[in-house]
Image: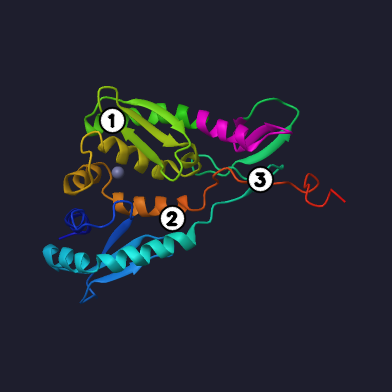
Amino acid sequence: MDRAGYARALASAGLPEELPWRVTVSSRRRTIGLTAEPGGSLTIRIPEGMPSDQVVQAVTRRLPWIARATRRNAETAAAHATKELIDGENFPFLGRNRQLVLSARAGVRLDGDRLLAPVHVTAADIIGWYAAAGSDWLAERAPQYCSRLGVPPPALGVRDLGRRWGTCAPGASPRLVLHWAVFQLSAQLIDVVIVHEVAHLVHPKHGGAFERLVGQVFPDYRDRLTELTEQGRRVWMGDVRPADGRNGLHSAS
Ligand SMILES: [Zn+2]
């Protein structure tokens, strides 16, 4: 059995819904190895040739430990960036670095690898730009995955979703919404959010059928999801630090 086969089998092992996990298969292992990674994800190392029911059993037996260890790591590892709204600050878009350039011009816009903004730009302005630019990109990107998954394109949106990267509401007028902050990451990782959420229009719950469907689009789905979680911990969520000279901390006396 290959990695994808084990991943499908493990999709019904009862792992926590929100836990990102990945599978490796090694000819040098004799036993199953479970590692809670620093970002809060789980790596499941499987000896080559081990029957999948044996793998599922071993993982199921250790679910309490898995929940404890990964939660602890997730809590200590969140390290969202704080930015300064000054020339040269980096605001990545689609995985590429974009340098903030302040000028007298109004409005925020992208010019190659430069993000042009007015001198008194606020975090809300930049978040608004991410939402608008992300919406345009999503409108071009989402339809191809909807047709590959065999669902009609839902209505699209981009906004602050708190701790989630995406949501999808099924029903008569289905709607796919992505978090504005996810557009800092590479297209390869944003695609994971799109495919995951659109797949929920077919299978509302996680499990073997869901895993098979997303695996048809991305055979490396689990790896990408883990990467998304790890990189997602470091993206900018809107926190800004006052720039030097605009710092009010010592100005009162
Ligand atoms: Zn889901």
Q: Which mark is residue 230?
A: 2
Give the residue number, with chain letter if any, for mark 1. 146
Residue 161 percent across, percent down from the top left: 44, 39
**Circle 1 SS class:** helix
Q: Reply above or below: 29 against 155.
A: below
**Where the N terminus falls, by quadrant?**
bottom left
- Binning the other alpha carbons within 10 Å of mark 2 as few (below 14), some (14 to 19) or many (20 upward) gives many
Q: Are the residues tagged 2 and 3 within 8 Å (C-beta)?
A: no
Mark in front: 2 vs 1: 2
Q: Which residue is mark 3?
A: 89
**Upstream in sequence: badge 3 or badge 1:** 3
Query: In the image, is residue 33 above or below residue 79?
Result: below
**Dot 3: element:** loop
Q: Which residues are magenta?
A: 109-132
When asked about the image quadrant of residue 74, the answer is bottom left
CA–CA distance between discs 2 and 3? 22 Å
In the picture, measured across the screen, residue 244 lies left or right of residue 44, that is right
